Amino acid sequence: MGVPEELKAKRCELAGRARELAAALAELQAQIAAVDKVTSIYEPEWKPDEQPKKRRGRPPMAMSAKELDKLIGGTNKRQMTIEILRTARRPLSTAECAQEFATRHGLSGDDPRVALIGNRLSSILDALQKAGRVRHAGMLDGHSRQWEIAA
């Protein structure tokens, strides 16, 4: 079978799938109409078109990356991360490093910006590991890496 025949067969397959999906959509729309009709019996003032739409996408972040850069932009993040690990008495998770980083910048541990700092430190810790400056010291709960200064 040549390329044109394969393409025609694929098109035929896709068109068949599109017909199946259109039929399924029509069935779902009929079911929605039936539910709307029964609902209007119980609540005559209810209008299905006035229901709030589900919000899609990510919720807005408390702080953008640019705002975070204004807060910690002048800091040598690599050096401070190494210093945090050096002064720690035990290996730290990325989240613990982020909390200490935030504390050193005057933020409280429950500040929503700590999560953004953690995201930034995660890539910094990976880069420091590649450079041989830090290493993994195990997993905290099977998910969170523990970091320590490489000997």
Image (cartoon, rainbow, N blue to C red):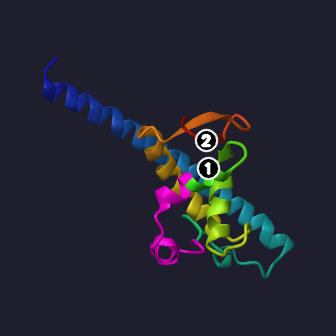
Name the quadrant of the C terminus: top right
Q: Residue at x 69, y 50 (%)?
A: 88
Q: Is residue 74 magenta?
A: yes
* Element type at mark 1: helix
Q: Residue at x 61, y 42 (%)?
A: 147
Task: Tell me the chief SS of the magenta region.
Answer: helix
| The one of 135 and 30 positioned closer to us in this rendering | 135
Residue found at x 47% / y 52%: 124
Q: How many numbered marks are there?
A: 2
Task: Classify residue 44 by image quadrant.
Answer: bottom right
Which contiguous range is marked in magenta?
Answer: 60-82
Residue flagged by tag 2: what amino acid is it?
A: Glu
Q: CA distance from mark 1 to mark 2?
A: 6 Å
Amino acid tagged 1: Leu
Badge 1: residue crowd in 10 Å (few <14, some 14–19, many ≥20): many
Q: Which numbered marker is on residue 85?
A: 1
Residue 20 in picture, x, y percent from top left: 47, 40
Mark 2 neighbour density, 10 Å: few (under 14) some (14–19) many (20 or more): many
Above or below 114: residue 8: above
Q: Nearer the viewer, residue 94 or 41?
A: 94
Query: From the viewer's perspective, is 42 left or right of 102?
Result: right
